[in-house]
Amino acid sequence: MEFLFAQFPLFGIVLFALVFGVIIGSFLNVYIYRFHTGKSLMGSSHCLSCGTDLKPYELVPLFSYLALRGRCRTCSSHIPSRYFLVELLTGLLFVGVVLVATDVMTLIHMLVMMSLLVVVAVYDMYHMVIPDELVVSLLVVVLSLQYYMHIMGLPLQVFWYNIAAALLASLFFMTLWRVSRGTWIGFGDVKLVVPLALAVGYIQVFSMVVLSFWIGAVIGVAIMLWQKLQRQRQLHFRFLPTELTLKSAVPFAPFLILGFLTVYFFEINVITLLSYA
């Protein structure tokens, strides 16, 4: 795969993408917190515990959290580690997109898509719902990218194959939703899988879905082990709002998104993997 910025030093490109992504991640944190609350995105940032307005040097992505050791400078309450993780994750995703994108238009579309996916994943983890506005935005971005790819030579037949695969994936999720009466997955996942399936293409849809379930099982166990360690050692670096148990309702969107990212970045094919097993 041709590297889009091959004429520039790799380290400089990666550093720029990381810094840019971290800055965008900081904005996404504000957007996630204020989404559907009626609060303006232009309002000043403040401590969620004491309400004190934050100084500019307390708003430097990543570094402020580390310098303050995860605590408010005024009241010493713990700052949600989500803020640090979202900034770091967005930065890493932007680096990944820059490394795999082959042209500028694809780069722009995928950076927007990654930003939306971060919002979807975090919002679903905290509120157990995937807002329709975000799914529609993802669908618009993906369809725009598909149209661009068609202009650049992608056969129209492939686009219709992608549509069919996305609808089949959605039908599969809808079946799970109906059979489980919403306890296995939510209806938001039924809608979210459509733009994700379109983005990976019909060849990789099966791998994306299977990987999402595998990743969900592994991460679910890992989170419960981490929470047990937290209780034993009184750690405060926590991402989920509540503790996870075997009976917990778990948001599936983050796992579906991770399945998508695994296929998109690493081109993993589940059928090929199983053939070697």
Image: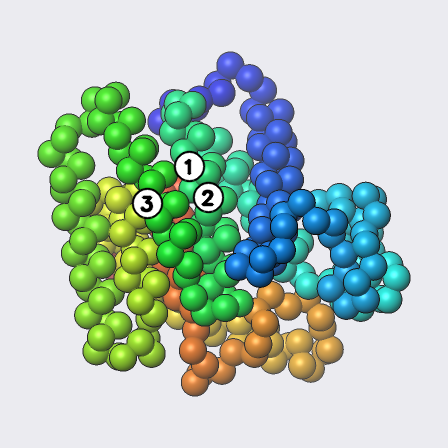
Q: Position of residue 213 (x, y in %)?
A: 33, 65
Residue assigned mark 1: 110
Q: How is the image coloured?
A: rainbow
SS at mark 2? helix
Q: Are marks 1 and 2 in contact (CB under 8 Å)?
A: yes
CA gap, disc 3 to disc 1?
Answer: 12 Å
Q: Could you tell me which residue is drawn at 29 percent across and 58 percent down?
A: 191
Q: Earlier in the sequence, mark 3 or mark 1?
A: 1
Q: Position of residue 187 (x, y in %)?
A: 31, 67
Q: Considering only vertical position in the picture, is 163 above or below 100?
A: below
96 relative to 54 in the view: left or right: left
Residue assigned mark 3: 139
Residue assigned mark 2: 114
- Residue 10 lies in quadrant: top right
Q: Amino acid at mark 3?
A: Leu
Q: Amino acid at mark 1?
A: Met
